[in-house]
């Protein structure tokens, strides 16, 4: 049975967007339910990791009778243990002492740089070049797919506390991907006929106005690129602000733009992030899903498996079934990236596979479109296939769903059993092998990229 969040009537128009952050979160009526210690912890952690929520999340998604354990509260409000103890104590002392903003920012930036702000080679290996110049608002990791970061879309309606793109939101110099250059994207696609997919990502591109989004989408359509077959847009807006597609001032224009993209002959995929089944319950979310589907877009859903949020197979099965009922396509179960607050959210690989397997057993074939659990690691997307025994050794079996070298894809490989490992680089090759099969080539790719950028 689902649990409806407890609402507090505020007298304001619920369809009018109101953002909350460190500067005004104490004005939220529900904050009266928190102790002063809890409020202080939000302030301390929010000085290091990004914090932003809004009135829809607060009023519709969080069960305020279940604080501090409510998963949607943990998903959007910073918690003390999201910082390592020594980092928390350092920042807490500064806040208590009334340190200057400059001193707090200096400490926060130092801590952030210790949190692996750009995992999986994003700065070193993924930045493409055009005519010898780097395109810093794009990434090209896999042969068929280019990621594009439109500058106006590098924020969100609310921030997820686990987000691996948290450096986009904290203003740390040199750690933000963004591009205003739609013409560079078109030129790059013309120069790279192997690319079939463009993923607009962020942040959240659907936070942009319809007019600004059109500045990026319409040139792609007008260019009539024969190699470009699929346009994807990553978004959390369906959950965190469904009124973006219903009652915002330009929601009709947004829907019309997406309908135009779908009608152009390009496959339009909305890559929707839902981390908990409660996000699918509010009527505005369901209405927004139906309106998006009416454009001809396909909504594909994804989420990492996260401690404190959704590390329960019954919950995943409920979420996948609800998504199928609403006409969405379950797509990925990821693992928490090795960045930011991974120590707080990470589920060991073996346990994540158990959760996936048990949840997969509880859905029909229509829900078994989902893949996982998958790590978006430096060499590629690595799926944990399971635990078994071979040659008298207990092992973890994996394969690539995507790889920097396409030849790596779907080649099984094996690691020694480790029920505590949470990421690929914590595993050791099985059967006494010194290295995984891809490691030598990955190091060569890294050296070549370093040489090209020097």
Image (spheres, rainbow, N blue to C red):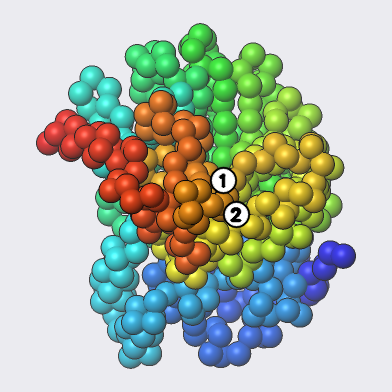
Q: Which residue is mark 1?
A: 385
Within-10-Å neighbours for mark 2: few <14, some 14–19, many 20+: many
Q: Is residue 421 above or below residue 372?
A: below
Q: Is residue 278 visible?
A: no
Left-right relation of 403 to 108: right
Checking the image for residue 353, the label placed there is 2
Q: Residue 303, labelled with which disc? A: none
Quarter of the rendering occupied by the N terminus: bottom right
User: Which residue appears at 70% of the width and 30% of the height?
Assistant: 298
Q: Quadrant location of the C terminus?
A: top left
Residue 211, image x, y percentages: 57, 31
Q: If you read the primary sequence from the N terminus, does the residue marked by circle 2 or circle 1 appear first?
A: 2
Q: Residues within 10 Å of mark 1 (few under 14, many from 20)?
A: many
Report whether residue 254 is seen: yes
| Mark pair 2, 1: CA separation | 7 Å
On screen, 223 above or below 167? Answer: above
Q: Residue at x 57, y 31 (%)?
A: 232
Query: Residue 410's spot in the image, x, y percent?
Result: 50, 32
Looking at the picture, tell me which residue is in the foreground, 147 or 216.
147
Q: Mark 2 near mark 1, Cβ–Cβ under 8 Å?
A: yes
Element type where label 2 sits in the image: helix
Dot 1: element: strand
Give x and y (percent) for residue 22.
Answer: 49, 72
Toward the viewer: 381 or 16? 381
Farthest residue to the front: give it. Answer: 392
| Residue closer to the observer: 266 or 374 | 374
Q: Does residue 219 sit above or below 336 in this rendering? A: above
Q: Is residue 22 left or right of residue 15?
A: left
């Amino acid at each position: 049975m689902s649990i409806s969040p407890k609402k507090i009537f505020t007298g304001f128009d619920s369809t009018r967007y109101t953002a909350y952050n460190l500067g005004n979160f104490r004005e939220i009526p529900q904050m009266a339910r928190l102790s002063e210690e809890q409020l202080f912890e939000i302030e301390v952690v929010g000085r290091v990791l990004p914090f932003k929520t809004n009135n829809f999340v607060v009023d519709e998604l969080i069960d305020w009778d279940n604080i501090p354990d409510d998963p949607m509260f943990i998903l959007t409000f910073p918690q003390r243990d999201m910082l390592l103890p020594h980092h928390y104590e350092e920042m807490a002392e500064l806040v208590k002492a009334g340190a200057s903003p400059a001193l707090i920012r200096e400490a926060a930036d130092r801590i952030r740089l210790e949190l692996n702000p750009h995992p999986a080679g994003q700065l070193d290996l993924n930045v493409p070049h055009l005519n010898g110049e780097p395109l810093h608002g794009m990434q090209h990791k896999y042969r068929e797919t280019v990621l594009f970061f439109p500058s106006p879309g590098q924020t969100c309606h609310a921030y997820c506390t686990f987000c691996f793109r948290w450096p986009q939101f904290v203003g740390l110099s040199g750690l933000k991907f963004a591009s205003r250059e739609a013409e560079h994207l078109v030129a790059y696609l013309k120069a790279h006929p192997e690319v079939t997919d463009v993923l607009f990502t962020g942040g959240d591109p659907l936070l942009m106005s319809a007019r600004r989004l059109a500045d990026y989408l319409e040139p792609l359509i007008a260019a009539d690129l024969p190699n470009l077959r699929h346009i994807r847009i990553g978004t959390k807006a369906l959950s965190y602000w469904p009124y973006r597609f219903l009652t915002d001032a330009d929601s009709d224009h947004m829907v019309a733009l997406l309908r135009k993209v779908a009608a152009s002959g390009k496959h339009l995929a909305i890559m929707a992030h839902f981390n908990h089944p409660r996000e699918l319950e509010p009527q505005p979310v369901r209405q927004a899903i139906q309106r998006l589907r009416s454009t001809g877009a396909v909504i594909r859903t994804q989420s990492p498996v996260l401690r404190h949020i959704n590390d329960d197979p019954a919950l995943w099965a409920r979420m996948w079934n609800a998504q199928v009922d609403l006409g969405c396509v379950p797509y990925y179960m990821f693992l928490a990236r090795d960045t930011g607050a991974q120590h707080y959210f990470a589920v060991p690989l073996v346990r994540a596979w158990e959760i996936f397997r048990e949840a997969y057993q509880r859905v029909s074939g229509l829900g078994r479109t989902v893949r996982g659990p998958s790590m978006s690691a430096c060499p590629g997307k690595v799926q944990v296939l399971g635990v078994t025994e071979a040659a008298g050794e207990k092992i973890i079996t994996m394969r690539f769903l995507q790889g920097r070298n396409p030849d790596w894809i779907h080649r099984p490989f094996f690691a020694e059993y480790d029920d505590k490992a949470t990421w690929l680089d914590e595993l050791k090759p099985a059967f006494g092998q010194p290295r995984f099969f891809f490691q030598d080539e990955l190091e060569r790719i890294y050296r070549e990229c370093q040489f090209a950028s020097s």
